[in-house]
Amino acid sequence: MILFFVVRHVDRENTKTLAKIKSQAETDMLTGQPNRYGLLSYAEKRVTDNPYTALFIDLSKFKHLNDTLGHRVGDEALIAIARRINQTLKDGDMLVRFGGDEFLIMTSETQSGILEKKALRVIKAIEAPLRLGNKIVEIWANIGIASYPDDGEDVMEVISSADLAMYEAKQKVIPWCFFDQKIKQKHLGAIQIENDIIEALKYDEFSLAYQPQINNIGELIGVEALLRWNHREKGAIPPDEYINIAEHRGLMPQLGEHVLRLAAKDMNGLLSKISHPITLSINVSVSQFSSPNFASNLIEILGGIKGVQTNIVLEVTESLFIGDTSEVNRALHEIKQHGMMISLDDFGTGYSSLSLLRVLDIDELKIDRSLITPITQNNDALSVVKSIVDIGHTLGMSVLSEGIETKEQLALLTEIGCDRFQGFYFSKPLSPAALLEFINNP
């Protein structure tokens, strides 16, 4: 009997220990919420046909918070956000910390109206100003919503569908999005384009066209390199069908380096046949700029262009400067030490501010064509463009207007002091051979 009770006691203790270990393994140590392993246990229990819904939550700006305020503050924010989300849930709902800045809500609710109200409560809870120590921070969120059985045959497929819907919400800049088959087809299409880009790099299907840039006395002073893709089976593919996909799928550093090498090759061939250097403008994406060794690779590749090393302009967008700009400015300074210039592309369409322009080491403002198009019919539009020109000149920058299509637009922009121009009025983007002809026969 004594042996029996000893064995039973040991067995109970082992059972408790195993249960404790299992609980620890299935719990996120930071927030106290179930983690992915806990979610798998939940999935194993979902063997009935009862409908349920997954709400996939992604926190925006969280990486910036970590980078600027430190991981300790980031951890405090995650704890507070988990607490806030929990306060919006009803009995039976399950909150999971799915990843670094991702949460997941599992609920038995499936009616779209109720789910929208739930998503709204969660968004409001997350995005309310959050005090951390002596600082107040703001965190944004996007939510993807998918339900069983319509959007997946099991828990993991439903979560995958909710993840795709969340990504769609981020792209559309909306708080939440319900999964549907169009999103799935879009995702599958993106995967196909991603694979095609990799193959296109292998088979050398990309080339560059060059659009002339003209100064205010009508002289050709430079060109912008524009990427072109002639697919071996599908023919010409417009940039707006693959650039964003390449950016989001992590292919832009590889594709961007390919562009640099193409431009260096084309320019070396061109400059051997003309008598004066021209400025070469090349677009650089945020992910390229953030990739390791970008500056050194850039300097090595473009530094090999004979005769125009001091006439290279990198076009960047305002999204590069969201958040802390100190690291960006250091990289820009390194690049500019090698004689390259920086142009702020699509100016007037994004996050522009006077304080941002004042602290950035920018040489040129490039006014977006959407601001140029209405200036001949709308005095207010012309006043906006004139203000940009004045601001650029006050800060010591040159100003280039793109999208010039008419003589009237050119006359107005010249009158208000714009320095350089680009658009179909002068020329469409040209192949290297056609560009040589354009230069020799202005």
Image (cartoon, helix red, strand yellow):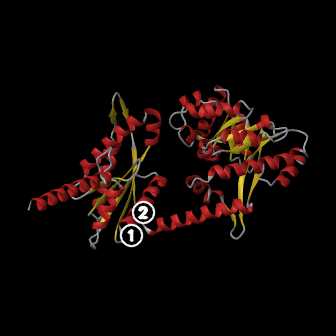
Residue drawn where x is 70% and y is 59% of the image: 201
Q: Is residue 412 visible?
A: no
What residue is rendered at 64% in x and 64% in y? 196
Q: Which residue is mark 1?
A: 152
Tell which circle, 1 or 2, labels the residue nearer the N-terminal end: 1
Q: Quadrant of residue 279?
A: top right
Q: Quadrant of residue 314?
A: top right
Crowding near the residue tagged with mark 1, few <14, some 14–19, many ≥20 C-alpha atoms within 10 Å: some
Q: Residue at x 32, y 63 (%)?
A: 53
- The spot of residue 90 in percent (x, y) is 22, 55
State the SS at label 1: loop
Describe the element under mark 2 as helix, strand or loop: helix
- Among all residues in the image, which is located at the extreme left? 1
Left or right, residue 254 beside residue 46? right
Which residue occupies the foreground of this view, 237 or 425? 237
Residue type, mark 1 in image: Gly
Is there a contact, CB below 8 Å, between mark 1 and mark 2? yes
**Where residue 361 sits: x, y (%)?**
64, 30
Q: Nearer the viewer, residue 30 or 418?
A: 30
Instruction: Please state if 20 lies on the left or on the right of 342 as rendered.
Output: left
Q: Residue furthest bottom?
A: 49
Q: Quadrant of residue 153?
A: bottom left
Query: Which residue is under mark 2?
Result: 160
